[in-house]
Each structure stands twice: as structure tokens, then as C-alpha cells.
Amino acid sequence: MAHRKTILFVHFGENWIRGSERVLLDLMAGLDQRRFRALLWCNAEAIAAEARRIGVQSVISPMAYFLDYSSPRPSPMAFLRLVREGIRLIRQENVAMVHANGAAPCQWMAPAARMAGVPLLAHLHAPYHKRSRYVTLLHMASRVVGASRHVLQGLGEDGLAASRLRVVMNGIDEARLAGPDRGFRQALGISPDDFVILSVGSLIRRKGHDRLIAALTRMRTSSPARLVIVGEGEDRGALEETARHLGLQGRVHFLGGRPALAATYQDADCFALASRVEAFGLVLAEAAVCGLPCVAVATGGIPEVVQDGRTGLLVHETEEEGIIASLARNLDQLAEDATMRATMGRAGQQAVSQSFSVERMVGEFEALYGEVIAAPAGHGWRGVALDPYLRAASYWPRRRSRASA
């Protein structure tokens, strides 16, 4: 397989397996081994161990990026070390192109890839603030791929050519979801007649679990309604206290961190996600493939995943009070209409098989890799698009001048 092209995947993140890590692992596992060889460079053992389990060679080293919100103090030596290590890996492993999983690795891989003469693809799972887009050098990537159109909006506003932007929706590995899972109804003593709402996500404010707890108190369904939350995070104590304060003991259940596999989804009657910010909502597609109708807040890329009125019900209100009231109404509607739940569940399964399969995602990336490798960035700095940076450089002095006027 000497003709195989080596793709260097670079990932910087926490020591866990969540949305962007899972997408990257599914992508690397699905690549055509006759055409591509995956090599992972990361800073966390959790994803490295999973990568090794699927046969992907992994390199682990400390990583950091600078000049962004909450970044550590700038360290030129640390930055240069990462650039040099990137160049070394590209040359030593005969890398054909670099795939940065997120914006942060672009800060050192953009110069490293340019110096080594290989193209760089940036794969974004979330939108970034203007400052973050510039300090991570995203505009220097050969291609920028977003998990949704929403993710790429800011880069288009910066002036990045549409030809360098691409949307590749995340894919769901149905075989992984079918893994061993015990469900939860029996363990929690939940009656078959109870209406169960499932939510999966980190217990942080951004995921909006507090909204679902508040909505539960406003539901008017004749069937007893329960909320089951899968995930861990810094807000667990506060969320548990909120449930107690609202008198929801025994109706709100926290299962902690565990893989949300098919049996977990199938033990519920519907899925709900009340995120304040969400670039894609991978768990919504997972719930749909398991036959669950979804209720979600129409933020970020969620309307690109949930078809309002067909595979689920979306909340379009923007004020907090209206959001909670609408969540309750939508959940009541599903609780009282089993036919609607079944119809939406079937439509969701069909939509996932058509638009959100892991095979479709991998195929789109493989085609893009071939396209990018066939037209590499070239050596040195020729061809680097500086327009977004020149535009920003002229904008910021004008902004300061207006502020001081």
C-alpha cells in the first residue's frame, strides 16, 4: 500500500471523549485503508487510547495555543516547539495533508504545513469569535470544513472565499450505538406508563438542562412525566438542587457519565435538548436514528439537524420565559400523541440514514482529501490569502478611533 496517502490528524482538547472526539474517531476508523493512512497527534490519552484501539498510530505531547480568550501567557518557545514538531512529523511520516480537528491546532499547524509544503484542512465543530478566528490563523487553511452552515458564517463574513469553505454534516455510526447497553427504566423503577424525556450532554450551563427541569414543572400531560439526564459536569450539584427546590425528587434522574447507546435512547419516549448554544447537536441525530422524536431550541446548527414538524418540534422563542413555556408545550404535545411520536420517530430514522450516516461523512471527507491533495498549498508563503487579515487590520484602528470620538 505504498501509494496510500498519510493524513496527519491534529487534535487539542480535554482528556475525554465527547462530540468532536467521537466524530474524529469515527472518521479515522471509516477511512478506506487502501487509499489513506491516519496518524493522530494529540495532547490527551483518552482519545489516543481510543485511536490505538481502532488501529491508528498516535503521538501524544503537550499543546497550547495563545492570544485568545482565557489562553495562557504567550510563550514564543512553546509555539516554536509545536511548529517544529509539526514539521518533523510531516516530513518523518511523509504526510500528504494535515487535518486539524478544531481551530486551536491551526495556530501552529498553519505555519508548519506551509513550511513543509502540504495543505491544511481545518474541521470546525463550533463557531468561533472573530478574535479566535484570527489568532488561530484559520484563514490560512487550504479548506475550512464546518459541521453546519452556522459554523462557517463568521469566516464568510471575514471575506474567506466560498470556494475554500465546505459543509460536511457529522455522521452517526449505527454499529457503535448498537453496543452493549442496559437501558435505565428498570433500574430507576420507571413505570411503562410514565412519559420519559431523555437528554444527553455535559452538565454545564450552555447545554440548558436547567431549562428542561423548569419546563417539567409546567407540563400538563395526564401521563406522569420524568426527565432522565445522561452526562457529568460542573453544574451537577446546582441542577440537583434546582430539582429539589422545585419538588421534582423522583421525577428528575441524573445517570452520570455513561455511553448513550441504543438501549438508553430506546428506553425514552422522546429526546430533548435545550442548549443555549449548539453548533450541530450530534445527540439529536443519535436519538433520531434510535427512533425518538426530538424537542430542541432552534439555536445554531440545530435547525439543520431537526426538521421542525417532521422529525421533531423546535422552540423558536428567544426570551428565557418563552423558551421554557414553549419547551413545556412541545413536550406536552408529544406526551399526549403517541401517533405523532411514532411518525416523527420513523421520519427521523429516514432522515439520518439519508443525511447523517457515518459512511456519507467519511465519503465526503475522502473526496475532499483527494481534491485538496491534488492542489496542494505549495512551499513557503506564496498563495497565502492575506485579505481577511488586511481587512481586519484596517478595521480595528477605525473602531478604536470611533470609540475615542
Image: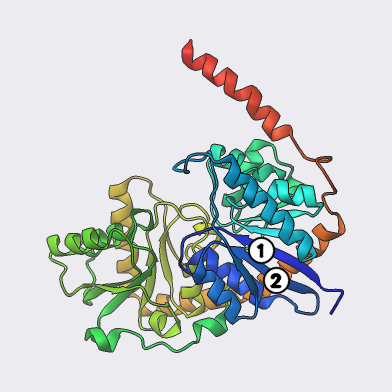
Q: Residue at x 59, y 51 (%)?
A: 103
**Up/down of 266 relative to 371, above or below:** below
- Residue, far top: 405
Q: Which residue is mark 2?
A: 38
Q: Are marks 1 and 2 in contact (CB under 8 Å)?
A: yes
**Camera-side residue of 222 and 295:** 295
Q: Is residue 129 left or right of residue 83?
A: left
Q: From mark 1 to mark 2, how far is it between C-alphas?
A: 7 Å
Q: Position of residue 315 (x, y in %)?
A: 40, 56
Mark 1, Cα crowd under 10 Å, few <14 / some 14-19 / many 20+, is: many
Q: Which residue is mark 1?
A: 9
**Camera-side residue of 273 and 193:** 273
Give me the disc on residue 267. Answer: none
Under mark 2, the amino acid is Ala
Q: Position of residue 43 (x, y in %)?
A: 54, 61
**Camera-side residue of 36 and 262:** 36
Q: Is residue 310 in view?
A: no
Report the quarter where the N terminus lies. Answer: bottom right
Q: Residue at x 58, y 81 (%)?
A: 53
**Up/down of 188 relative to 333, above or below:** below
Under mark 1, the amino acid is Phe
Q: Residue 244's image quarter? A: bottom left
Q: Residue at x 57, y 61 (%)?
A: 61
Mark 2 falls on what kind of element? strand
